[in-house]
Amino acid sequence: MTLLRAAGFTDIGKVRKENEDRMVFSDRVRLYGVADGVGGLPGGAEAAQETADVVTAEIKALEADSPLDLQAIVTKANDAVIVLGQRISPGMGIGSTLTFGLVRGSRLHVAHVGDSRAYSLRGGQLTCLTEDHSVENEARRRRAKGEVVYYNEAHRGALTRCMGQPTPPEVDLLNLPLRAEDRYIFCTDGVTRMITDRELRDIIGQGDSPDRIAKDLVSLAVERGGPDNATVVAVIIDAA
């Protein structure tokens, strides 16, 4: 059985009046991740909380050996956010990102919507496992297919997928083998916009516990101005 340690930490930052980040965290079912309320829309905290609650409840309801359909689980969470949005923000709706990993056996199942991120550190090499679902990245993908695409530079970071959108979001899914000494983090953009990949690698690699890694990353993001909420969930694989 895979042995692991996990911990999370969040901070409101120095600018925002409310923390709209939420952790998706359950040691019982080995579920770890983050949800981040979409800026520019009302009800960000409520959207992130609903996303986290529904995903966690759905995974807890699964039998240990039942088939795993993360697309269906994320779609159900998206539907719940839509319903909540119709009640608290009928004119605009509400939205959240979602990035999480579920450990089953010796594998990590990752689901991703939005611009929160998942990273792995293996053998000293840091890898970003997810791609931000932004206007800029969508344009890059379409241009690679030969399409002519233009966008307003001011909107380059705007999300093209999120929880709470009218149609079920396309979910990026990964199924990864785990190895002893692997380290994983799931974090909101309040962290990744303030810390370089090299710094991420060093802090993740040098931390002696998931709690230390999460706190050090969040603290650094806040020290650098904390313009957004900052949240990290860290996982260390001790044996796979």
Image: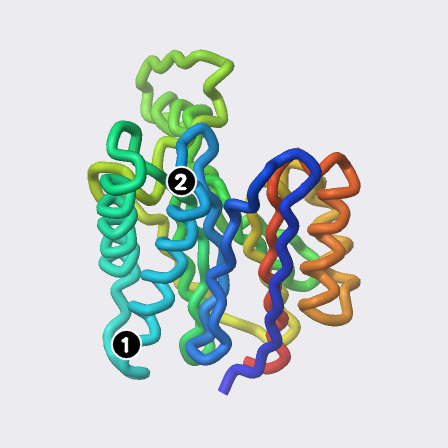
Where is residue 53, by image quadrant? bottom left
Position in image of residue 113 (x %, y %):
38, 45
Image position of 167 with respect to 53: above or below: above
Image position of 15 with respect to 67: above or below: above
Number of dots carrying numbers: 2
Where is residue 158, by image quadrant? top left
- Residue 43 image label: 2
Position in image of residue 223 (x %, y %):
79, 42
Circle 1 residue: 62
Q: Residues within 10 Å of mark 1 (few under 14, many from 20)?
A: few
- Disc 2 is placed on an element classified as loop
- Residue 105 image label: none
Residue 182 horizontal side relative to residue 93, left or right = right
- The residue sitting at 43% across, 80% down in the picture is 105
**Quick one: label 2 or label 1, which is nearer the N terminus?**
2
Residue 232 horizontal side relative to residue 31, left or right = right
- The residue lying toward the viewer, choosing from 96 and 99, is 96
Looking at the rendered image, the quarter that the C terminus falls into is: bottom right
- The residue lying toward the viewer, choosing from 62 and 148, is 62
Residue 75 horizontal side relative to residue 46, left or right = left
- The residue lying toward the viewer, choosing from 128 and 80, is 80
Q: Amino acid at mark 2?
A: Gly
Where is residue 197, by image quadrant? top right
